[in-house]
Amino acid sequence: MKPHIIIRSELPRMNPELRRDIITQKVRSMSDAELRALAKRRERKDPGRRLHPVGIGLPSDVLDRLTAAGDGPEHSVSALVDRLLGGET
């Protein structure tokens, strides 16, 4: 059983296996500094934002790096994952 994370995404629905593969490949190819830079929080007051919950099963090494990059008051794992999947910055 793979570890799961639940994020709030603004992207359209995607095949779960494709989503997992994209995130895994990008996280493993990026440095910690690059991931941290992408993890900057989204503006909360944007009235047009339509976030919905998404559960993602990931390898534990990928999940560990995502949560480390998104840790802190100025960073967000949800924003990071959306950006990795090609969402708005």
Image (cartoon, grey):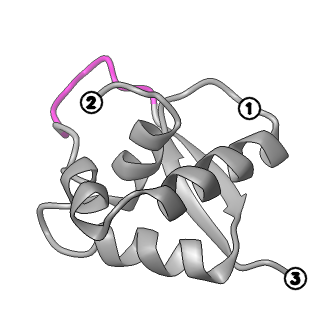
From this viewpoint, which residue is outermost toward the top?
A: 48
**Nearer to the camera, 26 or 76:** 26
Residue 1's disc is 3
Q: Is residue 76 left or right of residue 43?
A: right
On the image, numbered disc 1 is attached to which residue? 14
From this viewpoint, which residue is outermost toward the right?
A: 1
Q: Residue at image x 49%, y 81%?
A: 64
Measured along the vertical axis of the image, is residue 54 above or below residue 63? above
Looking at the picture, how far across and down is residue 9, in whole percent? 50, 40
Q: Where, quadrant-wise, is the C terminus in this rendering? A: top left
Tell me how far mark 2 sits from mark 3, CA to CA.
32 Å
Helix, strand or loop at label 2? It is: loop
Q: Residue at image x 48%, y 31%?
A: 10
Dot placed on the residue nearer the N-terminal end, 1 or 3: 3
The amino acid beneath tag 1 is Met
Dot placed on the residue nearer the N-terminal end, 2 or 1: 1
**Nearer to the camera, 18 or 49:** 18
| Part of the protein shown in magenta | 44-50
Residue 39's disc is none
**Nearer to the camera, 65 or 49:** 65
On the image, numbered disc 2 is attached to which residue? 89
Q: Residue at image x 81%, y 36%?
A: 15
